[in-house]
Amino acid sequence: MADTRVQLEVEDWVRLHWMPAKFGQKFHHERVGLSAGGVFDFDAVSEDRNIVGTISTSAAKTASGKHAVGKLLKIRSDMLFLVMAKAQRRVVVLTERGTFDLCRKESEGGRGTAATASCPCGPAWACPIPSARRQTASSRVP
């Protein structure tokens, strides 16, 4: 099984530092009600509960260089839950440039994955992770 500690640390950094700077309020990992019934645990929910988001730290390619189809399907699944979330604003945060570019390309081709205003979830945000932050997180992996 893959060691995901670094990815979890990056997700925490996005939620605790980048999103508050971008949107002007604190964010937490929280369960939100869905319009279809039930609930979903979102990666980022604003303090006033008006903004709900998902954070993807996944790369667009696997370690062997193949397209990360499963990871893209996970982003699409998260977007479906965002569409059903009881919130005023929905965001998708992608930390990997390759994933952001792939989602943008698919969206431009009519797939609506992310990165356009026509997406029912709103725009995707490319969140650049500072290289110092990446090195700190990477140094903790044994």
Image (spheres, rainbow, N blue to C red):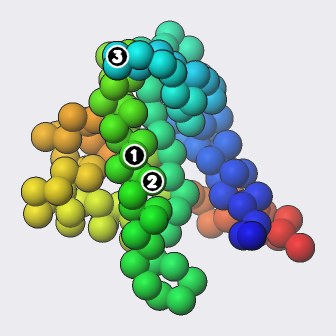
User: On the image, which quarter does residue 117 sit in?
Assistant: top left
**Amino acid at circle 3:** Ser
Residue, disc 3: 35
| 101 left or right of 43 in image | left
* Label 3: which secondary element: loop
* Label 2: which secondary element: helix
Residue for point 11% across, 63% down: 109
Label 2 Cα neighbours within 10 Å, binned few <14 / some 14-19 / many ≥20: few
Query: Disc 1 versus disc 2: distance between alpha carbons?
Result: 5 Å
Precedes in sequence: disc 1 or disc 3: 3
Q: Measured along the vertical axis of the image, is residue 9 above or below residue 105?
A: above
Query: Disc 1 versus disc 3: distance between alpha carbons?
Result: 16 Å
Q: Measured along the vertical axis of the image, is residue 51 above or below residue 55?
A: above
Label 1 Cα neighbours within 10 Å, binned few <14 / some 14-19 / many ≥20: few
Q: Position of residue 84 (x, y in %)?
A: 34, 25
User: On the image, which quarter does residue 91 sit in?
Assistant: top left
Mark number, residue 77: 1
Label 3 Cα neighbours within 10 Å, binned few <14 / some 14-19 / many ≥20: few
| 40 left or right of 82 in image | right
Dots 1, 3 in contact, CB < 8 A = no
Query: Disc 3 versus disc 2: distance between alpha carbons?
Result: 20 Å
**Amino acid at circle 2:** Lys
Which of the pair 112/101 is nearer the observer?
112
**Amino acid at circle 1:** Ser
* Label 1: which secondary element: helix
Residue, disc 2: 74
| 6 left or right of 55 in image | right
Which of the pair 58/26 is nearer the observer?
58
Residue for point 74% across, 70% down: 1
Dots 1, 2 in contact, CB < 8 A = yes
Residue 104 appears in the rendering:
yes
